[in-house]
Every structure is written in C-alpha cells, then in structure tokens.
Image: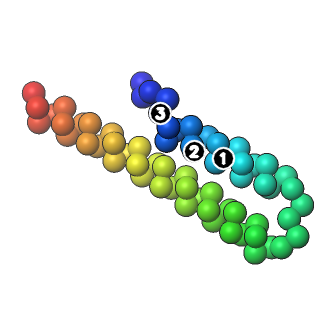
Amino acid sequence: MMPFDSTLRLSTFSGMALTVLMQLQLGSEEVLKTVVLAGVGGVSSYLFTIGLKYLIHYYKKKFNQ
C-alpha cells in the first residue's frame, strides 16, 4: 500500500476544488471549459506519475534481486 503523500493530497484538494467550482454558477462557458480541461490534465498527470512510480519500483525490485 502506498503512503498518503503530498501528491495524493494535492490531487484530492484539486478534485474537491473542481467540484466546488462546478457547483457555482459560472457566467462564462469558456471558464467552465478551462476548469474541466485543467481537471482532466491534472488527473492524467497524476495517473501517469503513479504509473511511472510503479514501473520504476517494479524494475528496481526485479533487477536488484
């Protein structure tokens, strides 16, 4: 199990902030589109980072036996 590090905290906070912003009545459609795209970009970046950490851990474990 992975520890609860700062990356996970930042991701959780970003998701919560995105949810709060979605509940507000935003006047501009462009602002909403920007918020959604930023959220998708943040999530994809986070998932890529977690996957890369897993692969590095896997290969270190495999080749350091």
Q: Dot 1, crowdedness within 10 Å: few (<14), some or many (≥20)?
A: some
Q: Residue at x 79, y 49 (%)?
A: 20
Q: Dot 3, crowdedness within 10 Å: few (<14), some or many (≥20)?
A: few
Instruction: State the CA–CA distance, disc 2 to disc 3.
Output: 10 Å
Kind of residue sitting beneath label 2: Ser
> Number of callouts in the render?
3
23 lies left or right of 31: right
- Tell us which disc is closer to us: 3 or 1: 3
- The residue beneath circle 2 is 11
**Residue 42 x/y as whole percent:** 55, 55
- The residue beneath circle 1 is 15
Q: Residue at x 63, y 57 (%)?
A: 39
20 lies left or right of 55: right
59 lies left or right of 27: left
Q: Which mark is residue 54?
A: none
**Residue 40 picture quarter:** bottom right
Of the numbered discs 2 and 3, the one sitting upstream in the chain is 3
Question: Pointers 2 and 1 in contact (CB under 8 A)?
Answer: yes
Question: Pointers 3 and 1 in contact (CB under 8 A)?
Answer: no
Q: Which mark is residue 5?
A: 3
Q: Secondary structure at mark 3?
A: loop
Q: Residue furthest front?
A: 6
Q: Dot 2, crowdedness within 10 Å: few (<14), some or many (≥20)?
A: some
**Residue 3 picture quarter:** top left
Vertical position of residue 37 compared to residue 10: above or below: below
Kind of residue sitting beneath label 1: Gly
Q: Secondary structure at mark 1?
A: helix
